[in-house]
Image: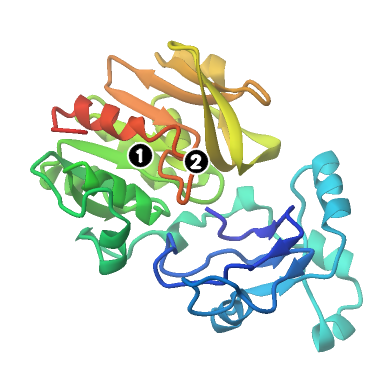
Amino acid sequence: SYHGQIVVMTHPHIGNTGVNGEDPESGRPWVRGFVAREFARRPSSHRADGSLADSMVERNVVGIHGIDTRALTRLLREEGCMRGIIASGEALETLTDPVGAARKIADLSSLDPVREVTAARRYEWSPSRSDRSRSATGLARPGPTVAVLDCGAKRNILRSLHDRGARVVVFPATAPAREILDAAPDGLLVSNGPGDPRQAAYAIATLRELLGRLPIQGICLGHQILALAAGAGTFKLKYGHHGGNHPVLHGPSGRIEITSQNHNYAVDPDQAAAAGFEITHTSLFDGTVEGMVHRELGLLSVQYHPEAAPGPHDAAALWGTFLDHLGGKAR
Protein backbone atom coordinates (compact mmCIF):
# COMPACT_ATOMS: atom_id res chain seq x y z
CA SER A 1 0.00 0.00 0.00
CA TYR A 2 2.99 2.35 0.41
CA HIS A 3 4.21 1.90 -3.18
CA GLY A 4 5.10 5.26 -4.70
CA GLN A 5 5.07 7.08 -1.35
CA ILE A 6 7.61 8.75 0.94
CA VAL A 7 6.74 7.78 4.51
CA VAL A 8 7.50 10.10 7.43
CA MET A 9 7.71 8.55 10.90
CA THR A 10 6.46 10.62 13.85
CA HIS A 11 8.34 8.63 16.51
CA PRO A 12 11.83 10.15 16.86
CA HIS A 13 13.89 6.94 16.98
CA ILE A 14 13.37 4.28 14.29
CA GLY A 15 15.08 0.91 13.79
CA ASN A 16 15.81 0.05 17.42
CA THR A 17 14.75 -3.59 16.99
CA GLY A 18 16.41 -4.10 13.60
CA VAL A 19 14.94 -6.38 10.94
CA ASN A 20 14.42 -10.12 10.56
CA GLY A 21 13.16 -12.59 8.00
CA GLU A 22 9.92 -13.49 9.78
CA ASP A 23 8.05 -10.22 10.12
CA PRO A 24 7.82 -8.76 6.57
CA GLU A 25 4.31 -8.61 5.12
CA SER A 26 5.57 -8.52 1.53
CA GLY A 27 8.42 -9.94 -0.52
CA ARG A 28 10.24 -6.59 -0.44
CA PRO A 29 9.73 -3.00 0.75
CA TRP A 30 7.64 -0.95 -1.70
CA VAL A 31 8.06 2.45 -0.07
CA ARG A 32 9.93 4.99 -2.26
CA GLY A 33 11.49 6.96 0.59
CA PHE A 34 11.76 6.74 4.37
CA VAL A 35 12.10 9.74 6.70
CA ALA A 36 12.91 9.75 10.42
CA ARG A 37 14.30 12.04 13.08
CA GLU A 38 17.00 9.46 13.75
CA PHE A 39 17.70 5.94 12.49
CA ALA A 40 19.15 3.62 15.12
CA ARG A 41 22.73 2.67 14.27
CA ARG A 42 22.79 -0.55 16.32
CA PRO A 43 19.70 -2.76 16.68
CA SER A 44 18.91 -4.22 20.07
CA SER A 45 16.71 -7.32 19.81
CA HIS A 46 17.33 -11.04 20.12
CA ARG A 47 15.20 -11.51 16.98
CA ALA A 48 17.21 -9.13 14.78
CA ASP A 49 19.31 -10.56 11.97
CA GLY A 50 20.30 -7.18 10.53
CA SER A 51 19.91 -3.43 10.86
CA LEU A 52 17.29 -1.25 9.22
CA ALA A 53 20.00 0.77 7.45
CA ASP A 54 21.64 -2.34 5.97
CA SER A 55 18.24 -3.62 4.82
CA MET A 56 17.43 -0.30 3.13
CA VAL A 57 20.77 -0.24 1.32
CA GLU A 58 20.38 -3.85 0.23
CA ARG A 59 16.91 -3.19 -1.17
CA ASN A 60 17.70 0.22 -2.66
CA VAL A 61 15.30 2.20 -0.46
CA VAL A 62 16.43 5.80 0.03
CA GLY A 63 16.16 7.27 3.52
CA ILE A 64 16.93 10.52 5.29
CA HIS A 65 17.24 11.44 8.96
CA GLY A 66 18.51 14.32 11.05
CA ILE A 67 15.61 16.56 10.09
CA ASP A 68 12.83 18.05 12.22
CA THR A 69 10.05 15.53 11.60
CA ARG A 70 7.77 17.38 14.02
CA ALA A 71 7.85 20.44 11.75
CA LEU A 72 7.36 18.26 8.67
CA THR A 73 4.41 16.50 10.32
CA ARG A 74 2.79 19.85 11.16
CA LEU A 75 3.23 20.93 7.54
CA LEU A 76 1.60 17.76 6.24
CA ARG A 77 -1.26 18.17 8.73
CA GLU A 78 -1.95 21.65 7.35
CA GLU A 79 -1.32 21.07 3.65
CA GLY A 80 -2.27 17.41 3.28
CA CYS A 81 -0.27 14.87 1.25
CA MET A 82 2.44 16.55 -0.82
CA ARG A 83 4.87 15.57 -3.57
CA GLY A 84 8.53 15.55 -2.65
CA ILE A 85 12.04 14.34 -3.42
CA ILE A 86 15.00 13.12 -1.37
CA ALA A 87 18.44 14.01 -2.75
CA SER A 88 22.01 14.22 -1.45
CA GLY A 89 25.60 14.35 -2.65
CA GLU A 90 26.13 14.72 -6.40
CA ALA A 91 22.41 14.41 -7.12
CA LEU A 92 21.70 17.41 -4.91
CA GLU A 93 24.52 19.43 -6.45
CA THR A 94 23.12 18.93 -9.96
CA LEU A 95 19.54 19.60 -8.88
CA THR A 96 19.23 23.31 -9.60
CA ASP A 97 15.49 23.52 -8.89
CA PRO A 98 14.44 20.89 -6.32
CA VAL A 99 11.02 22.45 -5.76
CA GLY A 100 10.34 22.50 -9.49
CA ALA A 101 11.50 18.89 -9.76
CA ALA A 102 9.08 17.89 -7.01
CA ARG A 103 6.20 19.66 -8.72
CA LYS A 104 6.85 17.70 -11.90
CA ILE A 105 6.31 14.36 -10.14
CA ALA A 106 3.11 12.73 -11.38
CA ASP A 107 0.22 12.83 -8.93
CA LEU A 108 -0.56 9.39 -7.51
CA SER A 109 -4.15 9.74 -8.74
CA SER A 110 -2.90 9.57 -12.33
CA LEU A 111 -0.93 6.35 -11.90
CA ASP A 112 -1.85 2.65 -11.77
CA PRO A 113 0.51 1.21 -9.13
CA VAL A 114 -1.63 -1.92 -8.59
CA ARG A 115 -0.22 -3.44 -11.80
CA GLU A 116 3.28 -3.07 -10.34
CA VAL A 117 2.57 -4.79 -7.01
CA THR A 118 0.12 -7.56 -7.91
CA ALA A 119 1.03 -11.23 -8.27
CA ALA A 120 2.46 -12.23 -11.64
CA ARG A 121 0.33 -15.39 -11.85
CA ARG A 122 -2.33 -17.41 -10.09
CA TYR A 123 -1.11 -19.63 -7.23
CA GLU A 124 -2.41 -21.52 -4.22
CA TRP A 125 -1.02 -20.08 -1.00
CA SER A 126 0.58 -22.28 1.63
CA PRO A 127 2.38 -21.03 4.74
CA SER A 128 6.15 -20.79 4.82
CA ARG A 129 8.14 -21.81 7.88
CA SER A 130 7.97 -18.26 9.25
CA ASP A 131 4.24 -18.09 8.54
CA ARG A 132 3.73 -21.32 10.48
CA SER A 133 5.69 -19.93 13.41
CA ARG A 134 3.31 -16.95 13.54
CA SER A 135 0.15 -18.97 12.90
CA ALA A 136 -2.56 -19.13 15.52
CA THR A 137 -2.92 -22.87 14.99
CA GLY A 138 -0.16 -24.07 12.70
CA LEU A 139 -2.65 -26.37 10.95
CA ALA A 140 -5.29 -25.81 8.32
CA ARG A 141 -8.73 -27.30 8.75
CA PRO A 142 -11.22 -28.30 6.05
CA GLY A 143 -13.14 -25.25 5.00
CA PRO A 144 -14.17 -23.07 2.05
CA THR A 145 -12.04 -22.05 -0.91
CA VAL A 146 -11.39 -18.31 -0.92
CA ALA A 147 -10.12 -16.56 -4.05
CA VAL A 148 -7.99 -13.50 -3.26
CA LEU A 149 -7.73 -10.74 -5.85
CA ASP A 150 -4.22 -9.48 -5.12
CA CYS A 151 -4.08 -5.70 -5.44
CA GLY A 152 -1.04 -5.62 -3.14
CA ALA A 153 -2.07 -8.15 -0.50
CA LYS A 154 -0.31 -8.37 2.85
CA ARG A 155 0.76 -11.86 3.85
CA ASN A 156 -1.35 -11.74 7.00
CA ILE A 157 -4.52 -11.60 4.89
CA LEU A 158 -3.60 -14.97 3.42
CA ARG A 159 -2.36 -16.29 6.77
CA SER A 160 -5.55 -15.17 8.56
CA LEU A 161 -7.76 -17.00 6.06
CA HIS A 162 -5.60 -20.13 6.13
CA ASP A 163 -5.49 -20.22 9.94
CA ARG A 164 -9.28 -20.37 9.99
CA GLY A 165 -9.44 -23.35 7.67
CA ALA A 166 -9.75 -21.77 4.24
CA ARG A 167 -8.03 -22.94 1.09
CA VAL A 168 -6.54 -19.74 -0.37
CA VAL A 169 -6.07 -19.24 -4.12
CA VAL A 170 -4.44 -15.94 -5.15
CA PHE A 171 -5.16 -14.23 -8.48
CA PRO A 172 -3.48 -11.23 -10.13
CA ALA A 173 -5.53 -8.04 -9.96
CA THR A 174 -5.93 -8.22 -13.75
CA ALA A 175 -7.52 -11.69 -13.70
CA PRO A 176 -10.86 -11.83 -15.56
CA ALA A 177 -14.04 -12.98 -13.86
CA ARG A 178 -14.15 -16.25 -15.83
CA GLU A 179 -10.71 -17.30 -14.56
CA ILE A 180 -11.81 -16.75 -10.96
CA LEU A 181 -15.10 -18.60 -11.43
CA ASP A 182 -13.30 -21.53 -13.07
CA ALA A 183 -11.52 -22.12 -9.74
CA ALA A 184 -14.96 -22.70 -8.15
CA PRO A 185 -14.31 -20.56 -5.03
CA ASP A 186 -16.86 -20.22 -2.25
CA GLY A 187 -16.06 -16.52 -1.96
CA LEU A 188 -13.73 -13.74 -3.05
CA LEU A 189 -11.58 -11.34 -1.04
CA VAL A 190 -10.30 -8.14 -2.68
CA SER A 191 -7.10 -7.05 -0.95
CA ASN A 192 -5.45 -3.83 0.09
CA GLY A 193 -3.13 -2.02 -2.31
CA PRO A 194 -1.78 1.38 -3.44
CA GLY A 195 -3.17 4.31 -5.36
CA ASP A 196 -6.47 5.69 -6.61
CA PRO A 197 -9.06 2.90 -6.88
CA ARG A 198 -10.45 4.39 -10.08
CA GLN A 199 -7.18 3.61 -11.87
CA ALA A 200 -7.74 -0.13 -11.32
CA ALA A 201 -10.49 -0.21 -13.96
CA TYR A 202 -9.74 -3.87 -14.83
CA ALA A 203 -10.45 -4.97 -11.24
CA ILE A 204 -13.63 -2.89 -11.12
CA ALA A 205 -14.83 -4.54 -14.34
CA THR A 206 -14.08 -8.02 -12.97
CA LEU A 207 -16.01 -7.36 -9.78
CA ARG A 208 -19.01 -6.03 -11.70
CA GLU A 209 -19.24 -9.40 -13.44
CA LEU A 210 -19.00 -11.24 -10.11
CA LEU A 211 -21.56 -9.21 -8.14
CA GLY A 212 -24.33 -11.51 -6.95
CA ARG A 213 -22.44 -14.60 -8.10
CA LEU A 214 -20.00 -14.82 -5.17
CA PRO A 215 -19.89 -13.47 -1.61
CA ILE A 216 -17.17 -10.79 -1.65
CA GLN A 217 -15.15 -9.08 1.08
CA GLY A 218 -13.03 -5.99 0.43
CA ILE A 219 -10.20 -4.55 2.52
CA CYS A 220 -8.88 -0.99 2.17
CA LEU A 221 -8.32 -0.48 -1.59
CA GLY A 222 -10.47 -3.57 -2.13
CA HIS A 223 -13.26 -1.86 -0.15
CA GLN A 224 -13.05 1.14 -2.49
CA ILE A 225 -12.90 -0.95 -5.67
CA LEU A 226 -15.91 -2.96 -4.50
CA ALA A 227 -17.86 0.25 -3.91
CA LEU A 228 -17.06 1.49 -7.42
CA ALA A 229 -18.06 -1.84 -8.94
CA ALA A 230 -21.44 -1.70 -7.19
CA GLY A 231 -22.19 1.83 -8.38
CA ALA A 232 -20.94 4.02 -5.51
CA GLY A 233 -18.18 6.62 -5.72
CA THR A 234 -14.93 7.50 -4.00
CA PHE A 235 -13.11 10.75 -3.24
CA LYS A 236 -9.62 11.79 -2.18
CA LEU A 237 -9.02 12.77 1.44
CA LYS A 238 -6.94 15.86 2.10
CA TYR A 239 -4.82 14.21 4.76
CA GLY A 240 -5.53 10.51 4.45
CA HIS A 241 -5.58 8.08 7.38
CA HIS A 242 -2.20 6.67 8.40
CA GLY A 243 -1.33 4.89 11.64
CA GLY A 244 -2.11 2.08 14.03
CA ASN A 245 -4.43 3.83 16.48
CA HIS A 246 -7.53 4.96 14.56
CA PRO A 247 -10.83 4.57 16.46
CA VAL A 248 -13.73 3.18 14.43
CA LEU A 249 -17.36 2.91 15.58
CA HIS A 250 -19.31 -0.23 14.70
CA GLY A 251 -22.78 1.30 14.51
CA PRO A 252 -24.94 -1.82 15.00
CA SER A 253 -23.25 -2.78 18.28
CA GLY A 254 -21.91 0.57 19.47
CA ARG A 255 -18.49 -1.06 19.88
CA ILE A 256 -15.35 1.00 19.26
CA GLU A 257 -12.40 -0.72 17.58
CA ILE A 258 -8.84 0.59 17.47
CA THR A 259 -7.61 -0.05 13.94
CA SER A 260 -4.61 0.16 11.63
CA GLN A 261 -5.13 2.36 8.57
CA ASN A 262 -3.26 3.58 5.50
CA HIS A 263 -5.34 5.16 2.74
CA ASN A 264 -5.79 8.45 0.90
CA TYR A 265 -9.26 7.77 -0.55
CA ALA A 266 -12.68 7.09 0.95
CA VAL A 267 -16.12 5.87 -0.16
CA ASP A 268 -18.87 8.47 -0.63
CA PRO A 269 -21.53 7.59 2.00
CA ASP A 270 -24.52 8.99 0.10
CA GLN A 271 -23.61 7.17 -3.10
CA ALA A 272 -22.95 3.98 -1.13
CA ALA A 273 -26.43 4.16 0.43
CA ALA A 274 -27.98 4.82 -2.98
CA ALA A 275 -26.20 1.72 -4.33
CA GLY A 276 -27.78 -0.44 -1.62
CA PHE A 277 -25.02 -0.50 0.98
CA GLU A 278 -25.62 -0.25 4.71
CA ILE A 279 -22.88 1.72 6.46
CA THR A 280 -21.70 -0.35 9.44
CA HIS A 281 -18.47 1.38 10.51
CA THR A 282 -17.45 5.05 10.67
CA SER A 283 -14.26 6.85 11.61
CA LEU A 284 -14.39 8.66 14.95
CA PHE A 285 -11.77 11.07 13.63
CA ASP A 286 -13.67 12.49 10.64
CA GLY A 287 -16.88 10.46 10.17
CA THR A 288 -15.79 8.83 6.91
CA VAL A 289 -17.01 5.37 5.89
CA GLU A 290 -14.94 2.58 7.45
CA GLY A 291 -17.16 -0.42 6.71
CA MET A 292 -20.35 -1.45 4.92
CA VAL A 293 -22.45 -4.42 3.84
CA HIS A 294 -24.71 -5.08 0.87
CA ARG A 295 -27.10 -7.79 2.02
CA GLU A 296 -28.74 -8.40 -1.35
CA LEU A 297 -25.43 -8.94 -3.17
CA GLY A 298 -23.58 -10.56 -0.26
CA LEU A 299 -20.87 -7.90 0.03
CA LEU A 300 -18.83 -7.03 3.13
CA SER A 301 -16.02 -4.48 3.19
CA VAL A 302 -13.90 -2.44 5.58
CA GLN A 303 -11.58 0.50 4.98
CA TYR A 304 -9.16 -0.43 7.76
CA HIS A 305 -6.91 -3.49 8.18
CA PRO A 306 -8.25 -6.44 10.20
CA GLU A 307 -5.05 -8.28 9.22
CA ALA A 308 -2.82 -5.67 10.91
CA ALA A 309 0.50 -7.22 11.90
CA PRO A 310 1.72 -6.76 14.58
CA GLY A 311 -1.63 -5.18 15.46
CA PRO A 312 -4.01 -3.90 16.75
CA HIS A 313 -6.30 -6.95 16.66
CA ASP A 314 -9.67 -5.44 17.64
CA ALA A 315 -11.12 -6.28 14.22
CA ALA A 316 -9.86 -9.88 13.96
CA ALA A 317 -13.41 -11.22 14.38
CA LEU A 318 -14.17 -10.05 10.82
CA TRP A 319 -12.39 -13.12 9.43
CA GLY A 320 -14.84 -15.39 11.18
CA THR A 321 -17.76 -13.23 10.03
CA PHE A 322 -16.67 -13.56 6.40
CA LEU A 323 -16.03 -17.30 6.53
CA ASP A 324 -19.30 -17.92 8.37
CA HIS A 325 -20.96 -16.07 5.50
CA LEU A 326 -19.44 -18.64 3.13
CA GLY A 327 -20.74 -21.53 5.20
CA GLY A 328 -17.23 -22.53 6.26
CA LYS A 329 -16.18 -23.78 9.66
CA ALA A 330 -14.72 -20.56 10.99
CA ARG A 331 -13.33 -19.99 14.43
Label whose residue precedes the other's in the sequence (1 or 2) = 1
Q: Position of residue 293 (x, y in %)?
A: 37, 20
The residue tagged with tag 2: helix, strand or loop?
A: loop
At label 2, the amino acid type is Pro
Q: Position of residue 18 (x, y in %)?
A: 57, 72
Identify the residue under disc 1.
205
Within 10 Å of disc 1 (Cα), the crowding (few <14, some 14-19, many 20+) is some
Residue at figure coordinates x 42%, y 32% from the top left:
315
Most foreground residue, 19 or 211: 19
Between the residue at mark 1 and the residue at mark 2, the CA separation in whole angstroms equals 33 Å
Q: Position of residue 115 (x, y in %)?
A: 44, 59
- Identify the residue at the far bottom of this view: 90
Identify the residue under disc 2.
312
Instruction: Locate residue 244: give its quadrant.
Output: top right
Query: Is residue 207 something one can see in this rendering?
Result: yes
- Identify the residue at the far left of this view: 142
Query: Is residue 206 something one can see in this rendering?
Result: no
Q: Is 13 situated above or below 60?
A: above
